[in-house]
Amino acid sequence: MISLEHVLVVGALLFSIGLFIALSRRNAVGVLMGIELMLNSVNLNLIGFARFVEAPRPIDGQVFAVFVITVAAAEAAVALALAVAVYRLRQTIDVDRLNLLKW
Amino acid sequence: MLDDLDRIGPVLVMAGVAALIIIWDFIPRPLPAARGKPLLFVALLGPAAAAAWTVSLLLRDAHIGCGPLDPLALSNAPLCPGGGGTLVEGVFSFANSVVLDDLTIFFFFLFAGIGAAIILASNDYAKRFGDYEAEFYALILFATSAMLLLSASRDLILIFVALEMTGITQYILAALQKDRRSTEAGIKYLLLGATASAVILYGMAFLFGLTGTTRLVAPGDELSIASVINERGGDLGAGLIMSLVFLIGGLSFKMSVVPFQMWAPDVYEGAPAPVAAFLSVASKAAAFAVVLRIFFEGLSGETVRGDWADIFAIVAAVSMTVGNVFALVQSNIKRLLGYSSIAQAGNFMVGLAAVSAAEGGLSLGASGVLFFIAAYAFTNLGAFIVVIAISARIGSDQIADYAGLARRAPLLAAALAFALISLTGIPPTAGFIAKLYIFNAAVESNLIWLVVVAVLNSVVSAFYYLKVAGIMFMGESANQESIATSAALKLVLGVAVIGILFVGIVPSPLLDAARDAASVFSQ
Amino acid sequence: MTVAEVVFYLLALLSVIAAVGVVTVPNVVHAALFLILSLLGVAGFYILLSSEFLALVQVLIYGGAVATIILFGLMLTGGRDLPAVGPGAQWPLALLVSGALVVLLLTAVLNTTWPRDAGEMTLISINTLGSVLFREWLLPFELASLVLLVALIGAVVISSQEERES
């Protein structure tokens, strides 16, 4: 029988890998991929909770996931626009080379 | 349903005016130059209508207060017999996910004021956005409307969506100038902000999993995060601590404190000056509103209170120190204000940590945070308005270019110097009273070490704040040409300076408002 | 082992290995393809956890829209022509942070007593989800539409070419 812990362990692994990608990729779109993976692990947790946790309204977990997906898509669209704008001005989206503003 | 809509009326009119501006911009006009003025007035409609609506809500829902308070009392005296809101009863709407109480009203007024100030102050600068001037005003209003809703939200899902709305709007605003620095600021802000959002979400998901609900507080017997934690706080264990750490970690980005603070100087430097001003005041205030709602309402149970208060105390001390030390070596005024805002957010957090006092519970620290946020809004807006004015005219943000400003623009220089004095915390300014009040709250909670750290940090901050003032008054400039400013900017700068002085000399009205707002936490 | 368990472990293997692939392959376009694979694996979990609607949305939005956005992003920013670059200089630090995080998360997950039912299926029909979304969650729903509007305006404003100053 699959239990809640199974789901949460997969969620934790995906979240950590996503964070690693976000921190280590140099390409801005690559960083975005890591972020998408992190958001997906959150959704996986939410769906796991909605399925297993004893709650008066388990459906809220699914509703939450719907909103996360919606907002993530909007964010990705803005990220693409920004990446294109940066590339047009700088011919690179390598985050290590975007250093006009010092970290 | 209509009642529900009425209670979030300020949010609706603000967003409505934003949409109106977008449509307005479609109407072709013969002279592009004739655009600016009416646009400014249409944009101002948003905050004005929101404030008017809030006043009407207040008039309709107010019940009799508890009489005048001792004006200068800094003590922890109970406000009303039995506590509770003194102006408005908490009224729930939208299936209890939104609440209209004193805290909401406080933030409604604060955000409407900040929105109006930013719009007026952008009058000179907005021409730089070229064809996108209308979008600039619309996005500012959209962001402000989401912040209004944030301050009223008592539900994790609603908080998340509203937080993302402010976030996405601000990523766009940061990049709106579309030059190399501005777009770089935008993409850095977005990538870090989205990462922080994922971290917040992970914490929220755990909280949902542990409690089975997304409501922070609910009336009556309805299940809420607060009720579950009160019932079985002890055995939620590692999962609860984990979600606290994730929530604080992710929200630290929005508050711009350690460990997610590094974006602030970069984004402030790269973003257009009015946007930097907006981020440093409105966005930070919204983040603290969310923190107050989540921690002081949802997670205020006796069993978890100590855990997060300790984390907040450490974060406060580290943020102040990091912000001030880095600010010492800055040569760009927007970057300096970026680091200064990290240090100031550390000061706000002293109030978040001051919760362990037995009597009065959470409301003393919270009222300190609210008072500080309002005082800081006047002060930092004052400083940033001058930066906006100078940036719009001479196109530079280097502190070296501020040399001799006292002769070129005596009013601007005096206003900036006054704002910097308030940021340092020297009387008779709002910043002084705010620090006094919040340190008092910390002392009451036995956080003496934190107050010592904070006072030492104030001394350090005096070096860089007063250095800027020194350069303006003592420095020599080759260029003696005077700097002209628009009437709108002068007006809002005057309001900010008078605000700093008024709150510094007669703090009681704002103090009462902050205490009323914080009284929602004493129930 | 039941069928559900076998499917679960296969999906877990698929999505985790694909996620590792995103970070190990040098070419960003290949990384994007691995990401899509991983996200489809997550959609599989949703079906397994009786959230068919979410699985459908996941395939449509992530497998369709977001994947397209990311691939477009790579094409428009010359990702294909870039020489294969390794991870950034801070990758050892990133590995340390993520490694510490995974240990912490697993400890927290396994040391918490989660409130749970007896393992009964909580079946939620699309009808219920829809009516809840439009009644109780109306406000965040409308707000989400504003988020999309703002993103639309922003994307147009930021990515449009300047023509006036030439």
Image (cartoon, coloured by chain):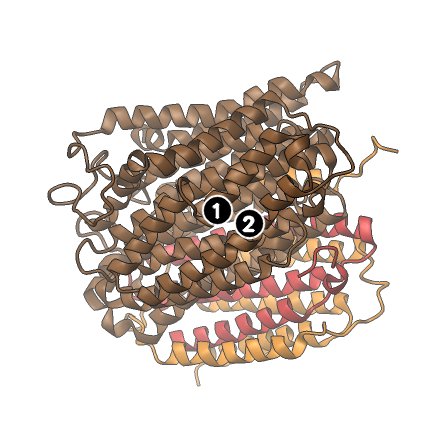
Chain colours: A red, B brown, C orange
The residue located at (71%, 40%) in the rendering is B177
Q: Quadrant of residue B445?
A: bottom left
Where residue B121 sits: x, y (%)? Answer: 58, 30
Q: Which mark is residue B423?
A: 1
SS of the residue under disc 1: helix
Q: Amino acid at mark 1?
A: Leu
Q: Which mark is residue B471?
A: none
The residue located at (47%, 69%) in the rendering is C48
SS of the residue under disc 2: helix
| Residue C91 in sight here | yes
Q: Do the CB atoms of the residues marked 2 and 1 lie less than 8 Å apart?
A: yes
Does residue C2 sit above or below C120 in this rendering? Answer: below
Crowding around mark 2 (Cα neighbors within 10 Å: few <14, some 14 to 19, many 20+) is many
Q: Amino acid at mark 2?
A: Tyr
Observer-nearest of A2 and B257: B257
Question: Most extreme residue toward the top, as rendered?
Answer: B30
